[in-house]
Each structure stands twice: as structure tokens, then as C-alpha cells.
Image (spheres, helix red, strand yellow):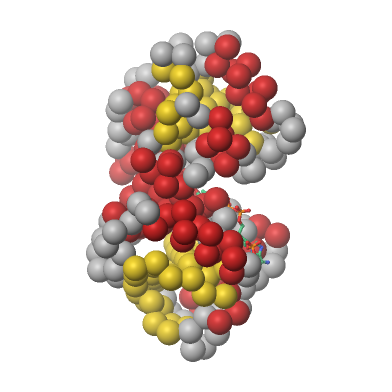
């Protein structure tokens, strides 16, 4: 039996085991998928123990994605661009890392039939999640991506890191309290809704679609978009999409998402 797990802190809330077990059942792969709580100062030991005990693959979640990136011997292009890793496996004694968050988001957006090609996209937040999605959104054809963050310097350093990987999409930064103009899509990649805080979207900011990366919690971002009559979605589709991509990386098979319900 193959052994997988998700590592984070906290981890009890993670829905990844349920999702991967459903994929395994559908594709007839014999696997186990656990949750592992890593101490904040013990991430490296936790993953080394897992692979030493013949583990096959790990997903990595908050707050360890950047630490995971730093530990890898071999990285995919999208992980290099993101400087954050959510999928690990061992091959020929080397730790490999990938970032499937962006593919998960792009697949979820396409499943909603929202177009990315030639679109102007505003992302709120410049943390690990934004790092993972900018290159995949650009590769999906976005014309312009504007990154708005409370701490503008963090958005600027993200653009500095990513611009070497992105050729045909214009990247811009803006302060979160300076939002204005029209966007085809706005994506909330702040963790504001996790802490119960909200972001106020000014009237001078207009948009046609609103995607909230968080899931399973009330979101004032979604409420404000609904008040404007704009189509909305929460991050469950992205979560399932990133899991499907990690499942493919590890097992070489893509689950059929249209017949699964979470
Ligand atoms: P990080 O902690 O790396 O970044 C948090 C971001 O939120 C920063 O840009 C921070 O701004 C901003 N922020 C936090 N609180 C506030 C606030 N009160 N007002 C304004 N901005 C705020 O988190 P991640 O990037 O890893 O995750 C972001 C969100 O995406 C979370 O909700 C997470 O659950 C979700 N996510 C969902 C996934 C999915 O599969 N659906 C996958 C990955 C993430 P500053 O830099 O100024 O501190």
C-alpha cells in the first residue's frame, strides 16, 4: 500500500485525506493518506522521518510551504517560480518538490467556465498562495495581473521573484487601500476571512467575477461580491484541483472530478 499524508500546523481541519481517499477509490489505487501535525520548529525532522519510513508523498500546507521549498533537491519550474512547495516525493534519494496550487485554481476557474485568456485580474494578498498562482494564471493567458497587498513591499518582492518566469503578462502591484478600476476577475488570496476580519471593496473598484481562496467559512469578500450581483466561488474547487494535480504527480492518473462530490 502506498503511503501519503498532509503536513501542517494546525492540521486537524484538513480535508485532503477525504479527497485523496475518494480519488484512490475511483482509480483503484491502494493507498493510505494521513494528517501529520509538525511542530513549528520540527518540520524538517517530520518529513525526513516520513520518507525514512517508506512514505511515498507529502502535501504541505500552512505554514511550511516555503520551508519545504528550501529543503528540496529538485524542483519543478512552477515550484521554482513560486518559491513555495505543496507536493513532495522522494526519487533516487533526492527530495522533489512541486507546487500544484496554481493548477488547482486555474482548473477550478475553468470548471466555472470563467475565462482567463486576455483577462485583467486583481489578486488581493501576496502570501504563499499568491506566489503559487501567478505563473499558472499567466500561463493560462491572463493579460495583466495586479497584486494588491496591505504590505506593498511584500507584493513588490513577489513580482521581482516571478517576473523572470513571466513574459507575456503584465505584473503590477498596488496598496490594498488604493483599489480602483475595472477587472475581469478579483481573487481574494488574503487570509483576512480566516481571522474573521474583512476587506472593504470600494465602490470605485468594479469586477465581473469574484473567487475566494478560503473555504468553509463566512467571507465578507463573497458577501460584497454577491451584493453587486457578481458570480462568486469559494476555494473548495481549488483545494480539490490542487489535490487532483498532486495525485497525478504521484500516481500518474487523473481522477475524474465530474463524478465526485465533496
Ligand atoms: P499567508 O499567510 O502566506 O499570506 C496571507 C496574506 O493575507 C498576506 O498577503 C497578508 O498581508 C494578507 N492578510 C492577512 N490578514 C489581512 C487583513 N486583515 N487585511 C488585509 N490583508 C491581510 O497565507 P497564504 O497565502 O498561504 O493563504 C492565503 C489564503 O488562501 C488563506 O485563506 C488560505 O486558506 C487560502 N488558500 C487556499 C487554498 C485552496 O486550495 N483553496 C490553497 C492555499 C491557500 P500582509 O503581507 O500585509 O501581512
The residue under the point 46% across, 47% down is 82
Residue 257: percent from left, percent from top: 33, 41
104 or 171: which is nearer to us? 171
The residue under the point 72% across, 28% down is 42
Which image quarter: residue 178? Answer: bottom right
Decide if residue 46 is in sight here.
yes
Apparent side of residue 143 relative to residue 158 in the rendered image (left or right):
left
Residue 192: percent from left, percent from top: 64, 63
Q: Could you tell me how many numbered marks the image carries?
A: 0
**Regarding ligand 1, which quadrant of the image does it lie in?**
bottom right
The residue under the point 38% across, 43% down is 78
Report the residue that reaches farthest toward the bottom: 204
Q: Is residue 199 above or below residue 3?
A: below
The residue under the point 59% across, 65% down is 153
Apparent side of residue 33 relative to residue 75 in the rendered image (left or right):
right
Residue 149: percent from left, percent from top: 57, 68
201 or 179: which is nearer to us? 179
Residue 239: percent from left, percent from top: 47, 46
Apparent side of residue 11 relative to residue 224 in the rendered image (left or right):
right
Decide if residue 2 is in sight here.
no
Apparent side of residue 130 relative to residue 48 in the rendered image (left or right):
left
Q: Is residue 61 above or below residue 148?
A: above
Q: Is residue 25 above or below residue 126?
A: above
Amino acid at each position: 500500500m502506498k503511503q501519503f499524508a498532509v503536513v501542517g500546523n494546525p492540521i486537524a481541519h484538513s480535508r485532503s485525506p477525504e479527497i485523496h481517499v475518494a480519488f484512490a477509490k475511483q482509480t483503484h489505487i491502494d493507498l493510505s493518506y494521513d494528517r501529520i501535525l509538525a511542530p513549528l520548529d520540527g518540520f524538517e525532522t517530520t518529513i525526513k522521518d516520513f520518507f525514512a519510513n517508506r512514505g511515498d508523498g507529502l502535501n504541505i500546507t500552512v505554514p511550511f510551504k516555503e520551508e519545504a521549498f528550501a529543503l528540496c533537491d529538485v524542483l519543478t519550474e512552477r515550484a521554482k517560480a513560486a518559491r513555495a512547495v505543496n507536493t513532495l516525493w522522494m526519487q533516487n534519494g533526492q527530495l522533489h518538490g512541486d507546487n500544484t496550487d496554481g493548477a488547482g485554481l486555474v482548473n477550478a476557474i475553468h470548471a466555472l467556465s470563467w475565462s482567463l485568456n486576455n483577462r485583467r485580474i486583481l489578486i488581493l494578498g501576496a502570501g504563499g498562495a499568491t506566489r503559487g498562482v501567478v505563473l499558472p494564471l499567466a500561463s493560462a493567458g491572463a493579460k495583466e495581473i495586479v497584486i494588491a497587498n496591505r504590505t506593498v513591499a511584500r507584493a513588490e518582492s513577489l513580482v521581482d521573484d516571478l517576473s523572470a518566469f513571466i513574459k507575456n503578462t503584465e505584473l503590477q502591484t498596488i496598496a490594498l487601500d488604493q483599489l480602483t478600476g475595472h477587472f475581469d476577475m478579483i481573487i481574494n488570496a488574503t487570509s483576512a476571512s480566516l481571522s474573521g476580519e474583512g476587506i472593504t471593496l470600494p465602490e470605485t473598484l468594479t469586477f465581473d467575477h469574484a473567487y475566494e481562496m478560503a473555504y468553509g467559512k463566512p467571507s465578507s469578500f463573497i458577501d460584497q461580491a454577491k451584493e453587486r450581483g457578481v458570480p462568486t466561488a469559494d476555494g473548495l474547487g481549488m483545494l480539490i484541483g490542487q489535490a487532483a494535480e498532486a495525485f497525478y504527480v504521484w500516481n500518474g492518473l487523473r481522477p475524474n472530478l465530474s463524478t465526485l462530490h465533496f
